[in-house]
Structure formats: structure tokens, C-alpha cells
Image (cartoon, rainbow, N blue to C red):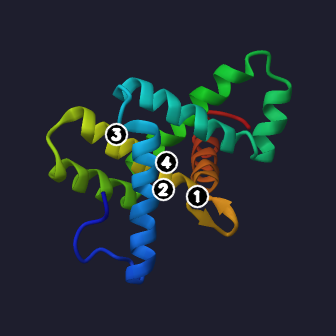
Amino acid sequence: MGRPKGDHHGLSSEKMTQLINYRYRILKKRYLNKSPQGGYQSLIKRLSLIILKYPPIERKIRHSANHQQFILRLTGQVLEYMLNHEPEVQKTLDWIGQCTHNPDLRAAFVLASLEEYCCQSVNHQPLLLHCLRHFLEEQAAKNVINI
């Protein structure tokens, strides 16, 4: 459940152990005994609560009749964006694929890793909000959405 050997990003052994233990607690508590679909839905709901705290999203959903569907769809889009654009996530997915061939266990590892990654603090905000900002900027540049 850790990281590939030699891939410690300058973290001390103690910090690395804390990170692995945190990810393991997430895995055990939220994803190990759920179906992959149930785990994914749980992850989307949990991350949606973080996205709701982003001010442009708060303003947007105040005027939306179907804000719950909007926020769940947006959260799914941001996760997809991260899976396709975040090198750290891609490395972790590759590594998980090498660790197990059991699809349910692999899904649980992926979901736990995504949650841990999204909740990492960067400039006192969850990394998910930084990814959301990049996603929204990219979509605005493509003129796809307007938030």
C-alpha cells in the first residue's frame, strides 16, 4: 500500500510510515469491504464535500436547481482529469497494477490512494481544490463550462 521502492520524494522514513498508515486506515475503513462501484460512489460523495467549499462552486450551486447532481458530476470530472493529467496518480495506478491482479482489491487500493492524494494539504488547502482550479481553467480555455 506504500509507494514503489526508491520513490520517497525526499520524505523521511517516519513521514513515509505515517503516510502509508494513513492510506491503510482509509483503505480498511472505507473501501476494503465495498464493491468497486459502492466505493467509487462513497469517494465521489466524500470529495464533493471538499469541492463544495470552493467559493466559485458555492456561488454557482446557490442558483442551481439541481445542485446535488451538478456537484457529483463535477467531482467525477475532476477525478477523471486527475487520473489523466496527474503524473503522481498515474505512477501510483501503475504500481497498484503490479501489486495485485484481483480487480476488487485493485479498485480498493486505487480509491484509497485517490482519497489520500486528494486530501493532501498544499498551501493549506486540499490538493483536490488545486486540481479543481486547473480543471476549471482548462475547461474555461476550451470554452466548455462557465463557472
- Asked if the residue under mark 4 is in contact with the one under mark 2, i.e. CB atoms within 8 Å, the reply is yes
Dot 1 corresponds to which residue? 127
Dot 3 corresponds to which residue? 108
| Label 1 vs 4, first from the N-terminus | 4
- Residue visible at 35% across and 45% down? 110
Dot 2 corresponds to which residue? 117
Residue 66 appears in which quarter of the rendering?
A: top right
Going by the numbered disc 4, the residue's amino acid type is Glu
Q: Is 120 or 88 nearer to us in this picture? A: 120
Q: Is residue 144 above or below residue 53?
A: above
- Residue visible at 73% across and 39% down? 52
Going by the numbered disc 2, the residue's amino acid type is Tyr
| Label 3 vs 1, first from the N-terminus | 3
Residue 123, position in %: x, y? 67, 69
What whole-number distance in Å separates the C-alpha atoms at marks 3 and 2?
14 Å
* Residue 76 in sight: no
- Asked if the residue under mark 1 is in contact with the one under mark 2, i.e. CB atoms within 8 Å, the reply is yes
Determine whether the residue tagged by mark 2 lies in a helix, strand or loop.
Answer: helix
Tell us which disc is closer to us: 3 or 1. 3
95 sits to left or right of 120: left
Which quadrant, please, contains the N terminus? bottom left
11 sits to left or right of 52: left
Residue 93, position in %: x, y? 29, 50
Q: Which mark identifies residue 115?
A: 4
